[in-house]
Image (cartoon, rainbow, N blue to C red):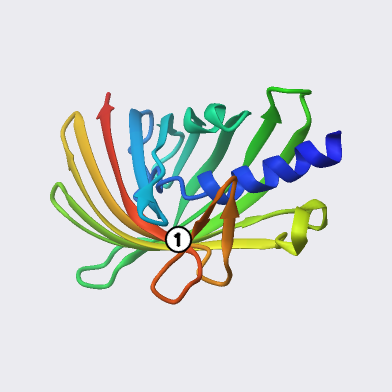
């Protein structure tokens, strides 16, 4: 039974690993950000809603911790929680982009029999900030330590994604827009649906977010 539920959770990761990038430029020390996100990765002729919420805090001038929950996972029978840190590697210098690095993990627990899986993740962001405007290009990957438990040979150790986005961070408000390509290395299968792209691999879609800063 648990092997089957692990397989279901393996399907869940392909559906909701396309969570939007939470923080690209670390917050100011002591600053909080609370936000909601919504994505629309394409599935065949339709779209899968991906809805979540998160909170982040600047723990230093160059490091921000975050935690979040994905509500859409509950529709697929799993509680999904995430946590991690974003840290500045190279500060922006004029037209030379800044670089930040993120690391953390995603935890899933089945609502059916409490089967559990954990996916470490890491990513890198290049960003350009001018006043309240932020442009970014990002790459991220999840690591599946139990990839071999997936049905039909669809398991994979790495689940990469690539994205580009724009953020307006103005005083207490932040708006986020991101286009994300999910798992361009292979076919993706979730319950009763394949997620195609123009080349027949991966998935893609726009993601939106709104947050308040205080």
* Residue 73 percent across, percent down from the top left: 54, 33
Q: Look at the picture and state if 55 lies above or below 144.
A: above
Q: Say which residue appears at 66% left-offset and 49% top-offset.
A: 120
Front residue of 30/39: it is 39
Q: Is residue 27 left or right of residue 66?
A: left
Instruction: Pick out the residue farthest to the bottom.
Output: 199
Q: Secondary structure at mark 1?
A: strand
Front residue of 35/57: it is 35
* Residue 132 percent across, percent down from the top left: 15, 46
Q: Say which residue appears at 73% left-offset and 23% top-offset.
A: 112
Q: Can residue 177 be seen from the camera position used here?
A: yes
Q: Quadrant of the N terminus?
A: top right
Residue underneath mark 1 = 203
Q: Say which residue appears at 33% left-offset and 30% top-offset.
A: 35
Q: Is residue 175 left or right of residue 126?
A: left
Q: Can residue 145 be seen from the camera position used here?
A: no
Q: Look at the picture and state if 85 lies above or below 1.
A: below
Q: Quadrant of the C terminus?
A: top left
The mark total stands at: 1
**Are there few (<14), some (14-19), or many (20+) residues within 10 Å of tag 1?**
many
Q: Is residue 87 left or right of residue 104?
A: left
Q: Look at the picture and state if 180 lies above or below 40.
A: below
Residue 57 lies in what quarter of the image? top left
* Residue 185 percent across, percent down from the top left: 56, 72
Front residue of 78/162: it is 78
Q: Say which residue appears at 47% left-offset and 50% top-offset.
A: 18
* Residue 148 percent across, percent down from the top left: 82, 57
């Amino acid at each position: 039974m648990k092997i089957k539920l692990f397989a279901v959770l393996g399907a869940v990761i392909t559906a909701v690993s396309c969570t939007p990038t939470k923080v690209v430029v670390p917050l100011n020390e002591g600053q909080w950000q609370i936000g909601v996100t919504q994505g629309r990765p394409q599935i065949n002729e339709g779209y899968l809603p991906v809805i979540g919420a998160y909170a982040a805090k600047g723990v230093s001038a160059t490091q921000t911790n975050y935690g979040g929950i994905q509500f859409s996972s509950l529709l697929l029978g799993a509680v999904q929680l995430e946590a991690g840190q974003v840290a500045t590697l190279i500060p922006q210098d004029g037209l030379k982009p800044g670089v930040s690095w993120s690391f953390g993990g995603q935890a899933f627990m089945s609502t059916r029999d409490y089967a559990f899986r954990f996916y470490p993740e890491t990513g890198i962001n290049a960003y350009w900030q001018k006043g309240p405007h932020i442009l970014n290009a990002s790459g991220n990957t999840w690591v599946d330590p139990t990839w071999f438990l997936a049905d039909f040979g669809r398991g994979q150790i790495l689940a990469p994604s690539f994205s580009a986005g724009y953020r307006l961070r103005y005083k207490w408000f932040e708006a986020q827009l991101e286009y994300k390509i999910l798992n361009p290395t292979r076919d993706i299968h979730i319950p009763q649906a394949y997620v195609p792209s123009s080349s027949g691999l991966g998935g893609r879609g726009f993601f939106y977010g709104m947050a308040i800063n205080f």
